[in-house]
Image (spheres, grey):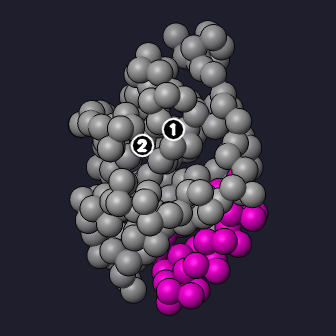
Amino acid sequence: MTSRDDPGKHHQHSVFSASHAAHLDTRFRRILYRPDHLSERYVKPGDRVLDFGCGPGFFTREFAKRAGDTGRVYAVDLQDEMLRIVEGKMESEGLLPRVTTHQCRPDSIGLPPELNATFDVAFAIFVVHEVPDPEKLFREIAALLKPGGTFFFSEPPIIVPGREFEDKVRLAGEAGFRPVDRSWFFVNRAATLKRE
């Protein structure tokens, strides 16, 4: 049974407004979430990285540093204001040549088909609960990843209860992912999956 068959299974939460973007990129959050450690664990130099729901670039910065001059990070967000913030930060830190920003639609990532099966790793951090159709999102991410590519997603536990998170992991499995690790990302539920 999918979320379409049982709409009660999925609760869409509101999108975090770009007007509060400064709250998402603070020194305190960098200490809590250690985006540098997350990047070291999953991103290799030369990788093509999808940062879906990038917000103001809190994780994008470290992904771009780690991917290096031969890599590329696609920072994708629904809000144009967030993408302008990302571009400003990346430019000021000399990382903009490694980053492509892309404004998605509410119902689709919308990257061109020629990018299918070209990404090494994808991230969706604290954002899947804002997506109207997570099943479709997971299918799109699976199409963008190379076979064997890694997908890491994490959700905040107060907003997303355990059963809702497990339902999302199951939907990801139906979309072509194999779960390889469940963990806590600081105090947030996280799953690492591989593209079949």
**Which quadrant of the figure has residue 2?**
top right
Residue at image point 51% right, 38% down: 138
- Circle 2: residue type: Phe
Residue count near mark 1 (Cα–Cα under 10 Å), binned few <14, some 14–19, many ≥20: many
Find numbered disc 1 in the image and state the secondary structure of the residue it sits on.
Answer: helix
- Circle 1: residue type: Phe
- Is the residue under label 2 in contact with that under label 1 (CB below 8 Å)? no
Q: Which residue is mark 1?
A: 138
**Which quadrant of the figure has residue 83?**
bottom right
On residue 153, the disc is 2
Q: Position of residue 59 (x, y in %)?
A: 45, 62
State which quarter of the image contains the C terminus: top left
Left or right of residue 26: residue 30:
left
Residue 81 colored magenta? yes
Q: Does residue 147 show up?
A: no
Left or right of residue 15: residue 56:
left
Residue 127 colored magenta? no
Mark 1 or 2: the one toward you: 2
Closer to the chain start, of discs 1 and 2, is 1
Residue at image point 47% right, 47% down: 125
Nearest the viewer among 21 and 90 is 21
Q: Which residues are magenta?
A: 72-100
Find numbered disc 2 in the image and state the secondary structure of the residue it sits on.
Answer: strand
Q: Does residue 36 show up?
A: yes
Nearest the viewer among 132 and 34 is 34
Q: Position of residue 146 (x, y in %)?
A: 38, 55
